[in-house]
Amino acid sequence: DSGVTQTPKHLITATGQRVTLRCSPRSGDLSVYWYQQSLDQGLQFLIQYYNGEERAKGNILERFSAQQFPDLHSELNLSSLELGDSALYFCASSVVVGEELASTDTQYFGPGTRLTVL
Amino acid sequence: ILNVEQSPQSLHVQEGDSTNFTCSFPSSNFYALHWYRWETAKSPEALFVMTLNGDEKKKGRISATLNTKEGYSYLYIKGSQPEDSATYLCAFGYNQGGKLIFGQGTELSVKP
């Protein structure tokens, strides 16, 4: 158990709908990362938040957005869902001792949310 | 486009065999190389973070080496056990931020 929690574990919804995935980082971790794992692709970085602010962005679609709240939990919002959005969504967290060295911090992954869009 | 390649894609070995796999990454703008172990139905678990050229890390029967000048890292497992069966991922950190580029992974299957 990494100490990172994600809810829900599974989510089944229809095309066009909107969903929210939630992540609570490990106690003391300031940085949260979101990743997408689709069938034929490796883990794809979506977005990183550090202490409430967006820090880095990957190939995140405009239909997707995220935020990190004052208590450091994060939510990933996916809207106008398409069949291709079906994937495993992971959240990870890290301490980020020095913000400038975030690449060297171990990222601890949560159990993931499996999203199925029908 | 930054690319991280892992080989082989999959590996089947017998219990007791030693094995190794490769992670290739761009040799410029290197900040860190991460190794993760990902068991089916679980989340990726951090094995090592390597930052210096020539770095060697060890955790039990698993070890890793790093060559940043030529852009590769090797992961070795000595005396593989069935519980080592998992997908091993490497991830490249290329700048100051926390963004990591993951490889597709090497799927290891160890038969008793």
Image (tube, rainbow, N blue to C red):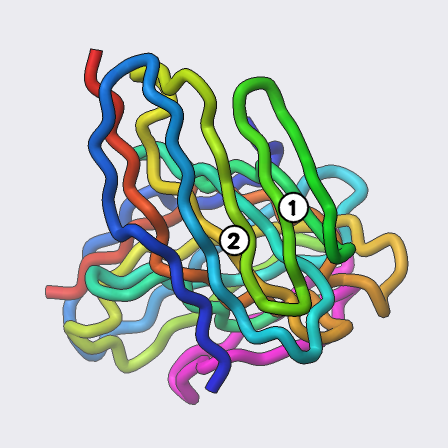
Residue A68: in magenta span: yes
Residue contact between numbered discs 1 and 2, judged by CB atoms under 8 Å = yes
- Subunit of label 1: A
The quadrant of the picture occupied by the C terminus of chain B is top left
Disc sitting over residue A25 in the figure: 1
- Count of numbered marks: 2
Nearer the observer, A45 or B88: B88
Say if residue A54 shows up in the picture.
no
On the picture, is B40 further left or further right than A75?
Answer: left
**Marker disc for residue A91:** 2
The amino acid on which the numbered mark 1 sits, given as a three-letter code, is: Pro
Of all chains, the one bearing label 2 is A
Q: Quadrant of residue A66?
A: bottom right
Q: Secondary structure at mark 2?
A: strand
The reply, left or right, for residue B21 in relation to residue B52 is left
The percent position of residue B83, horizontal first and vertical second, equals 35, 17
Looking at the picture, do discs 1 and 2 lie on one chain?
yes
Residue under the image location 39 percent in, 24 percent down: B18
Residue in view at x 59 percent, y 18 percent = B60
In the displayed structure, B95 sits above or below A110; it is: below
Q: What residue is rendered at 34% in x and 78% in y?
A: A79
Q: Position of residue B13 (x, y in %)?
A: 24, 26
Residue A112: image location, x then y, percent: 41, 46
Is residue A37 left or right of B74 when viewed as pictured?
A: left
Task: Count neighbours of disc 2 (C-alpha within 10 A) and say few if under 14, some if 14 to 19, many if 20 or more.
Answer: many
Residue B31 falls inside the magenta stretch: no
Residue B104 placement (x, y as % from top left): 34, 59
Q: Which residues are magenta?
A: A50-71
